[in-house]
């Protein structure tokens, strides 16, 4: 089964399936614990998150399954502090998870593909939180 992370560029999170998810929880059914949707409110934030260096990290995590951020830095031939900063940014947005393994943190990805949708808001100058994960 393909696990897809749905990313929407728009001004507000799509919560259309929230009631169904809450009903499933109330009925005692198993519900995917990770958010399957991420809404990014600004085009600038989208561009920052999905810049080539971050996409390279996502690809390397999938392909090489590194045991630590330091190993990931070796794989992509970049300085560990830079990779650490990028990895934490990706984790903050829910694009990767960091599993504690002693002193090391192992970056993992729970999805197989990313699907993008939504309108691209040109000229938006709103401030505030740019993301919202919705289960």
Image: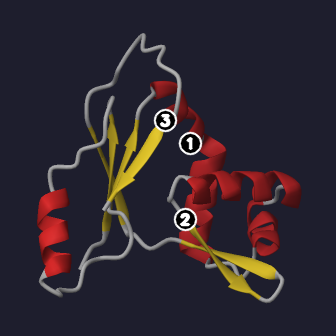
Q: Is residue 90 left or right of residue 82?
A: left
Within 10 Å of disc 1 (Cα), the crowding (few <14, some 14-19, many 20+) is some
Q: Is mark 3 on a helix, strand or loop?
A: loop
Measured along the vertical axis of the image, is residue 7 above or below residue 22? above
In the picture of the structure, the residue carrying the numbered disc 2 is 96
- The one of 18 and 109 positioned closer to us in this rendering: 18
Spatial separation of the CA atoms under disc 2 and disc 3: 17 Å
Q: Which of marks 2 and 3 is nearer the N terminus?
A: 2
Give the CA distance from mark 1 to mark 2: 12 Å
The quarter of the rendered structure image containing the C terminus is bottom left
Q: Which percent across, then down, holds residue 70?
A: 82, 71
> Does 47 sit above or below residue 31?
above
CB of mark 1 within 8 Å of CB of mark 3? no
SS label for mark 1:
helix
> Which of the two labelled residues, at mark 1 and mark 2, occupies the earlier sequence position?
1
User: Between marks 1 and 3, how big is the CA–CA gap?
Assistant: 11 Å
- Residue 111 placement, left or right of 77: left
Which residue is farthest front?
A: 26
The answer to which of marks 1 and 3 sits earlier in the sequence is 1
Rendered image: mark on residue 15: none
Please provide percent x and percent y for residue 87: 68, 58
Q: Residue 49 carries which label?
A: 1
Residue 130: mark in rendering: 3
Question: Residue shown at 79%/74% (left/top)?
Answer: 71
């Amino acid at each position: 089964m393909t696990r897809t992370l749905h990313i929407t560029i728009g001004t507000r999170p799509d919560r259309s399936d929230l009631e169904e998810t809450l009903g499933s929880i109330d009925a005692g059914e198993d519900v995917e614990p990770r958010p399957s949707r991420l809404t990014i409110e600004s085009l600038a934030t989208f561009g920052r998150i999905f810049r080539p260096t971050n996409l390279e990290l996502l690809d390397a995590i999938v392909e090489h399954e590194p045991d630590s951020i330091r190993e990931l830095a070796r794989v992509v031939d970049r300085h560990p502090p830079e990779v650490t900063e990028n990895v934490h940014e990706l984790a903050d947005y829910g694009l990767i998870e960091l599993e504690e393994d002693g002193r090391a943190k192992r970056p993992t990805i729970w999805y197989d593909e990313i699907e993008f949708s939504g309108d691209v808001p040109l000229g938006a100058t709103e401030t505030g939180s740019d993301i919202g994960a919705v289960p």
